[in-house]
Image (spheres, grey):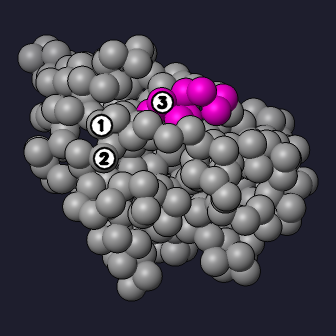
Amino acid sequence: MNTETLRRHWSEGKTSYNIFLTIPSPWTAELITHSGWETFTIDMQHGLMTFDATLAMLQAAAPTGATPFIRLPWNDPAITMKVLDAGAAGVICPMINTAEDVERFVAACRYPPMGYRSYGPIRAKHHTEGNYFAEANEQVLAFAMIETADAVANLEKIAAVRGLDGLFIGPFDLSVSLGLDRIADFSDPGLNEVFQRVLERCAEHDLLSGVFTSKVEDAEKVAEMGFNLVTCGDDSSILEQAVKGRREELG
Ligand code: 3PY
Ligand code: MG
């Protein structure tokens, strides 16, 4: 669960690439984390995960040392605490709209007095070098997703909540919510304005910055802009493209 290496990497101004896992399979988790991805995110929101699949995937990926993030299905303290107990090093919470949403999310990630996380790190304590309880409040990475017009309007207050580690942009929902002509078009000025505003708030409040992308060129663009955690696609889409391409090659 140790996120120190990752934090050191980011403090040196480097980007960490990430991939979303949507297929509920320990084998794909094992295969992907053996393929050089230093961080991965099990997607419990749009991915096809049950909690059982999530646990098995964390177990399958553990020997590689890749840092496990989980995208929560919703801002629900029960599942937030459960995935942290299961060994998630970081959690990404979708559809954060207000500072109150962030407070609810962050407090579920932190033990008292910082928050109200319940004690019981059943698996997590076996996956940390030191004392899990003593280190968890510092180590667990809590990212709030910025993916609605409301979140953009409330960005200042959202970024100012104590205990939050980072902001993570969801360009698909954001494009829908802002009513942009094209979805997740990284050349859209409206989207780029949000990217800049998020980077500015992150610099101001000492927060980490992240973005979901689905294309290599978009991932490279946001890495160049200075985002810390850059997701580049998910296993289902990559598999789909590869198998379609292979079939087409055969004519
Ligand atoms: C979005 O872009 O809306 C996302 O949630 C990425 O997974
Ligand atoms: Mg989204």
Dot 2 amino acid type: Lys
The quadrant of the image that shows the C terminus is top left
* Observer-nearest of 38 and 87: 87
Residue annotated with mark 1: 123
Please, what secondary structure does the residue beneath circle 2 have?
A: helix
Dot 1 amino acid type: Arg
Query: Of tags 2 and 3, which is closer to the observer?
Result: 2
Q: Is residue 155 above or below residue 144?
A: below
Answer left or right for 127 relative to 224.
Answer: left
| Residue 227, label in figure | none
Answer left or right for 199 relative to 11.
Answer: right
Please, what secondary structure does the residue beneath circle 3 have?
A: helix
Residue annotated with mark 3: 82
Q: Position of residue 231 (x, y in %)?
A: 43, 50
* Cα distance in 3D space between marks 2 and 3: 13 Å
Q: Position of residue 21 (x, y in %)?
A: 35, 32
Residue at 27% of width from left, 55% of height from top? 128
Stretch of the chain drawn in magenta? 76-83
In the rendered image, the residue lying farthest to the bottom is 12
C-beta proximity under 8 Å, tags 2 and 3: no
Residue annotated with mark 2: 125
C-beta proximity under 8 Å, tags 2 and 1: yes
Dot 3 amino acid type: Lys
The CB of the residue at mark 3 lies under 8 Å from ligand 1: no
Q: Position of residue 215 (x, y in %)?
A: 42, 46
* Cα distance in 3D space between marks 3 and 1: 10 Å
Answer left or right for 230 relative to 132.
Answer: right
* Cα distance in 3D space between marks 2 and 1: 5 Å
* Observer-nearest of 171 and 39: 39
